[in-house]
Each structure stands twice: as structure tokens, then as C-alpha cells.
Image (cartoon, rainbow, N blue to C red):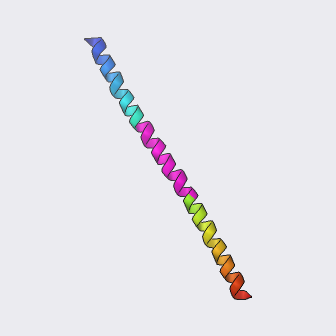
Amino acid sequence: MKKLLITEENEILQKKESFMERFFKVLFLIVFVGSYLLLVGVMSFKLLEYIFIYFISR
């Protein structure tokens, strides 16, 4: 009986760990992709800004 309870507890802990692992993987992916998109957005905006300034000043 004790062994059965221990195995059930281990299964519950493994499920919690896998959920937390997945949560952190998704969170890391969101942060990584978000920062990449932000960087690309800022770079393209600055590039367009420089192009407009260049053509206006000519």
C-alpha cells in the first residue's frame, strides 16, 4: 500500500515538473521571439527613417 502511494506521488510530481518545463519553454520562446521581432521592427523603422531623411534632403 505504501509503495502504491509513493508511486502515485512520483507520477503527480512528474506531471507537475513536465507542466512547469513546458511553461518555461513556452515563456522562453515567447520572450526570445518577442525580443527578436522588436529588434527587427526597430531596425527596419530606423532604416526607413534614414531612407526618408536621405531622399528628403536631396
Residue at horizontal 41 percent and vertical 33 percent from the top? 18
Q: Position of residue 31 (x, y in %)?
A: 51, 52
* Nearer the observer, 20 or 29: 29
Q: Which residues are magenta?
A: 20-36
Residue at horizontal 64 percent and vertical 77 percent from the top? 49
Left or right: where does residue 29 sit relative to residue 50?
left
Count the labels in the image. 0
Left or right: where does residue 47 sit relative to residue 19?
right
Q: Is residue 39 above or below residue 16?
A: below
Q: Quadrant of residue 3?
A: top left
Q: Position of residue 26 (x, y in %)?
A: 46, 45
Q: Position of residue 33 (x, y in %)?
A: 53, 53
Q: Is residue 37 above or below residue 48?
A: above
Residue furthest right as drawn: 58
What quarter of the picture does the N terminus occupy? top left
Residue at horizontal 46 percent and vertical 47 percent from the top? 27
Left or right: where does residue 24 sit relative to residue 12?
right
Residue 51 in magenta stretch: no
Q: Position of residue 5 (x, y in %)?
A: 28, 17
Q: Is residue 46 above or below residue 27?
A: below
What quarter of the picture does the C terminus occupy? bottom right
Residue furthest left as drawn: 1
Q: Quadrant of residue 54?
A: bottom right
**Secondary structure that dominates the magenta span:** helix
